Image (cartoon, helix red, strand yellow):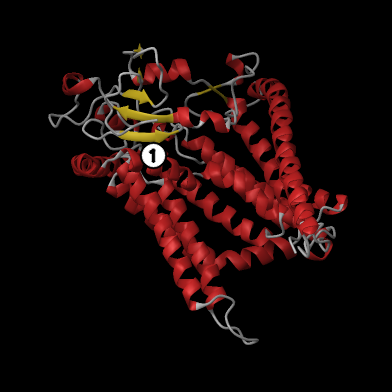
């Protein structure tokens, strides 16, 4: 585990690159005039704010806060919510889960779109020390997806809390004023932990976070105004629903901006757009084939909680549902991925002789390979026991001298290499592994994408949306496990 000093003798050091850190002339040459102009303005803000963040870190960093903000950052990731969202459908709260899905999907897509559109770097290290869990540091910085997710989710939950606190015509409010105050305080603390945590860990600048918060608030406002109307349209309309949803989602995938660097934002956008497509299709199909609310009438066994036996039964069934539901999704993911990687490349090669296929930068066309390696494509699911080793202490540049030698301007902020000190401890002393190549060259060696990966992700994650939002809850109802918790 990191201690916040960055001076341990037993930490592993790696030299890597960061998105948005190539020479400015690369971005000026690649981006059109208005994208390049906005990027220049944002980069100037990041440069100024980097010094402020470095001064703040020097004053407030402690080992406890390092650990707290690194691990609580996972509560603002789309990966966390992707695991949690199907559970609301498994346990009788599909409207709640659907609302969360739409909040997150639009947030991830819009911020990923903006990141690849403007290609802005994260705060420069040094002088800041960047703490990260996972691979978020490989993405561009502007705007902060964590800030967007935390604000949109907090406002979405605030709407529900406000509804519970408002007296109804039938009687008093569901929750008291005291409970209401505590819940609001909890939501504020959640947003503070996520947003300030992005500044504390130097993963984002103030500009990144303010922009992300604005995006999150805007998404919530749009949902308030049109969310119910869209839900009614999806449930009551005919074939127009799939005829609109499928082309719209595919168009959003196709029109995602081309970044200058190999940024993984595009993959995150594909995943969420495809899950939304699958959930809409499942919802539409279920309401037109008798699988509406009236179908899910059976409560879970032991839902009365009248005795300890009932409580034990309910908990056992709940655990079985979680295991079976997650395993079903994982098995689908594995089978669908293998099927697509087997079928899509030869189809692409055949179609390439008929017309020019869409091509995305950094994605190898099917005409240049024979098959997709089994270790490529969808990213593996990390084990929980691997999470502590994923905490990284990152400082761009190899000390002060190397940073000064590699600056693009005279401000000492813009080095092109980076150094990560991983939190895993070793009793055998310090182990160093260096790679002094240009980050773009390293990216070409370490990461290789295939054009089949795009439609593979669309197919796989669309299926996950259909399974989690439709097929699996229906299966639970048929098996007698129910989805109603009481």
Q: For residue 6, which quarter of the picture?
A: top left
Q: Which residue appears at 25% of the width and 30% of the height?
A: 24
Q: Position of residue 107 (x, y in %)?
A: 48, 51
Q: Quadrant of the C terminus?
A: bottom right
> Where, quadrant-wise, is the N terminus in this rendering?
top left
Whether residue 203 is visible here, answered yes or no, is: no
Q: Front-most of 101 and 398? A: 398
Using the image, determine if residue 317 lies above or below residue 166: above
Q: State the image quarter where residue 311 is shown.
A: bottom right
- In the rendered image, residue 34, in percent from the top left (x then y), is placed at 31, 43
Q: Residue at x 34, y 43 (%)?
A: 65
Q: Residue furthest left?
A: 410
CA neighbours of label 1 inside 10 A, class few (<14), some (14 to 19), many (20+): some
Which corner quadrant of the image does residue 93 belong to? Answer: bottom right
Residue bearing the label numbered 1: 67
Q: Position of residue 169 (x, y in %)?
A: 62, 87
Residue 345 appears anywhere in the view: yes
């Amino acid at each position: 585990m990191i201690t916040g000093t960055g001076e341990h003798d037993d930490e592993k050091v790696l030299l890597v690159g960061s998105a948005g850190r190539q020479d400015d002339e690369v971005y000026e040459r690649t981006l059109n005039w208005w994208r390049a102009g906005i990027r220049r303005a944002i980069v100037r803000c990041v440069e100024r704010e980097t010094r402020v963040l470095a001064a703040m870190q020097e004053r407030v960093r402690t080992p406890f806060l390092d650990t707290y903000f690194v691990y609580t950052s996972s509560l603002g990731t789309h990966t966390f919510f992707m695991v949690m969202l199907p559970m609301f459908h498994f346990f009788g709260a599909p409207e709640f889960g659907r609302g969360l899905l739409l909040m997150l999907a639009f947030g991830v897509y819009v911020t990923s779109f903006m990141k690849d559109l403007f290609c802005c770097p994260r705060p420069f290290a040094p002088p800041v020390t960047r703490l990260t869990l996972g691979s978020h540091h490989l993405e561009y910085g502007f705007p902060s997806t964590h800030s967007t997710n935390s604000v949109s989710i907090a406002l979405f939950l605030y709407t529900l809390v406000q509804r519970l606190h408002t007296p109804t015509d039938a009687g008093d409010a569901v929750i008291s004023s005291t409970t209401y105050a505590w819940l609001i305080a909890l939501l504020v603390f959640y947003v503070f932990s996520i947003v300030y945590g992005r500044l504390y860990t130097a993963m984002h600048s103030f500009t990144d976070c303010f922009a992300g918060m604005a995006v999150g608030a805007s998404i919530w406002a749009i949902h308030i105004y049109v969310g119910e109307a869209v839900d009614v349209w999806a449930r009551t309309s005919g074939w127009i629903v799939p005829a609109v949803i499928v082309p719209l989602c595919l168009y959003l995938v196709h029109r995602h901006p081309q970044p200058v660097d190999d940024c993984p934002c595009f993959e995150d956008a594909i995943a969420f757009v495809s899950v939304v497509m699958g959930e809409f299709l499942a919802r539409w199909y279920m309401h037109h084939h008798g699988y509406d609310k009236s179908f899910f009438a059976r409560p879970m066994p032991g839902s009365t909680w009248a005795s300890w036996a009932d409580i034990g039964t309910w908990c056992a069934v709940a655990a079985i549902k979680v295991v079976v539901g997650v395993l079903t999704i994982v098995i689908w993911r594995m089978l669908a991925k293998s099927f697509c990687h087997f079928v899509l490349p030869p189809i692409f090669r055949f179609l390439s002789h008929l017309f020019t296929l869409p091509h995305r930068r950094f994605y190898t066309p099917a005409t240049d390979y024979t098959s997709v390696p089994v270790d490529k494509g969808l990213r593996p699911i990390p084990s929980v026991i691997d999470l502590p080793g994923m905490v990284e202490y990152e400082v761009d540049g190899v000390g002060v001298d190397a940073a000064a030698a590699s600056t693009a301007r005279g401000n000492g902020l813009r080095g092109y290499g980076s150094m990560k000190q991983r939190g895993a401890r070793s009793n055998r002393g310090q182990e160093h592994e260096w790679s002094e190549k240009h980050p773009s060259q390293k990216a070409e060696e370490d990461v290789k994408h295939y054009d089949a990966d795009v439609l593979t992700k669309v197919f796989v994650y669309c299926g996950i949306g259909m399974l989690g939002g439709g097929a699996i809850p229906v299966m639970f109802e048929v098996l007698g496990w129910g989805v109603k918790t009481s």
